[in-house]
Image (tube, rainbow, N blue to C red):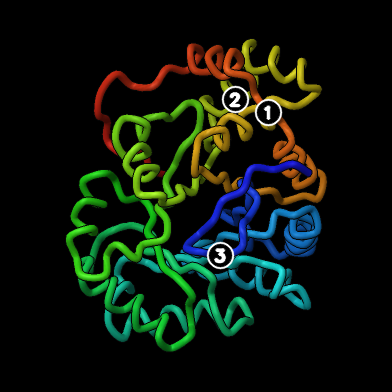
């Protein structure tokens, strides 16, 4: 495998495709398959697993915890804290709750899920306390736009932020106006969630678009693999698609080997142009 790699704050390089877990843990009937998919992903080198206390009210973390049995040291583990838990003793308690559900003693990366109830000063202080306590190794943010990042950067310790996780896919390119270039300038990796778009007409349109499928045919790949390859073609960007089956994981991992040409990227971006100016940060 000749994958592109991403580095978070001095960590060993990680493949530019990880594993998301949004919507996992919502059905007991699917639990075994979800656990198998996550373990298969790790076996195929997709060693970053991203989850959150929000997902299925903590049940997704329990799925991840089961998947981690015997392989915790092979995984770069990420979870996220609710905004209303992201300060003071609430942050400590929330992190400890995630650790219990994940059946581990530490997180490799802990993210503020979105900004809200606590100021950045309080969140940064809580994150640094968690590092001191050994419960997390580094911290970052999610769903913060350019102006939010500028505000975070002015807070004491704010520049220790290791990543920003945001929605990003070919059909949603608003971060390219200012947020993505700024993160690249800082050397801060961006984690792209929903890199294939959420279920619905946009996702269907992407997967059935003739240009995307023509390029996929040339690579003997699927449209989804081309969309993943496009996301990670950007410097410092990691994609974290969810895969609830072993076959889906295999396809995601294979996308690491796809190298799109400049001409192919230009065709894809002509099909789904970036907004001409600043737009509100896309979130789901």
Q: Are dots 2 and 3 in contact, CB under 8 Å? A: no
Measuring from the top left, give residue 129's x and y in whole percent: 35, 83
Q: Quadrant of residue 184?
A: top left
Label 2 crowd (10 A; few <14 / some 14-19 / many >=20): few
Where is mark 1, residue-wise? Answer: 259
Residue shown at 33%/57% (left/top)? 114
User: Looking at the image, is mark 2 or mark 3 earlier in the sequence?
Assistant: 3
Q: What residue is drawn where x is 40% and y is 86%? A: 132
The residue sitting at 45% across, 47% down in the picture is 190
Label 2 SS: helix
The location of residue 133, given as percent across then percent down, is: 43, 88
Count of numbered circles on the image: 3
Q: Which residue is mark 2?
A: 204
Q: Residue at x 56, y 51 (%)?
A: 6
First along the sequence among labels 2 and 1? 2
Depth-wise, is mark 2 or mark 1 nearer the camera?
A: 1
Answer with left or right where residue 8 lies relative to residue 146: right
Please report whichever mark, 3 or 1, sits nearer to the chain's N-terminal start: 3
Between the residue at mark 2 and the residue at mark 1, the CA separation in whole angstroms equals 23 Å
Where in the figure is residue 232, as x and y percent of width and height? 57, 37
Secondary structure beneath dot 3 equals loop
Q: CA distance from mark 3 to mark 1?
A: 25 Å
Residue annotated with mark 3 = 11
- The quarter of the picture where residue 83 lies is bottom left
């Amino acid at each position: 495998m000749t994958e592109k790699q991403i580095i978070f704050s001095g960590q060993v390089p990680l493949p530019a495709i990880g594993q998301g877990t949004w919507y996992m843990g919502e059905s007991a009937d699917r639990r075994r398959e979800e656990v198998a998919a996550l373990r298969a992903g790790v076996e195929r080198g997709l060693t970053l697993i991203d989850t959150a206390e929000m997902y299925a009210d903590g049940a997704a973390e329990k799925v991840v915890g089961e998947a981690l049995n015997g392989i915790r040291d092979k995984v770069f583990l990420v979870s996220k804290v609710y905004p209303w838990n992201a300060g003071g003793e609430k942050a400590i308690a929330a992190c400890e709750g995630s650790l219990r559900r994940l059946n581990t003693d530490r997180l490799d990366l802990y993210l503020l899920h979105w900004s809200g109830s606590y100021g950045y000063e309080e969140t940064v202080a809580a994150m640094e306390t968690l590092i001191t306590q050994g419960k997390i190794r580094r911290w970052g943010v999610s769903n913060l736009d350019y102006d939010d990042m500028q505000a975070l950067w002015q807070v004491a310790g704010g520049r220790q932020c290791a990543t920003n996780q945001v929605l990003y896919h070919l059909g949603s390119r608003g971060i390219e106006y200012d947020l993505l270039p700024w993160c690249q300038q800082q050397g801060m990796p961006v984690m792209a969630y929903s890199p294939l778009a959420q279920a619905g007409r946009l996702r269907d349109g992407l997967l059935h678009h003739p240009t995307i499928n023509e390029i996929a045919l040339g690579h003997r790949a699927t449209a989804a693999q081309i969309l993943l390859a496009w996301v990670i073609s950007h410097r410092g960007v990691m994609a974290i698609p969810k895969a609830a089956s072993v076959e889906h994981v295999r396809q995601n991992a294979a996308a690491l080997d796809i190298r799109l040409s400049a001409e192919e990227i230009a065709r894809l971006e002509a099909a789904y142009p970036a907004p001409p100016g600043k737009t509100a940060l896309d979130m789901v």
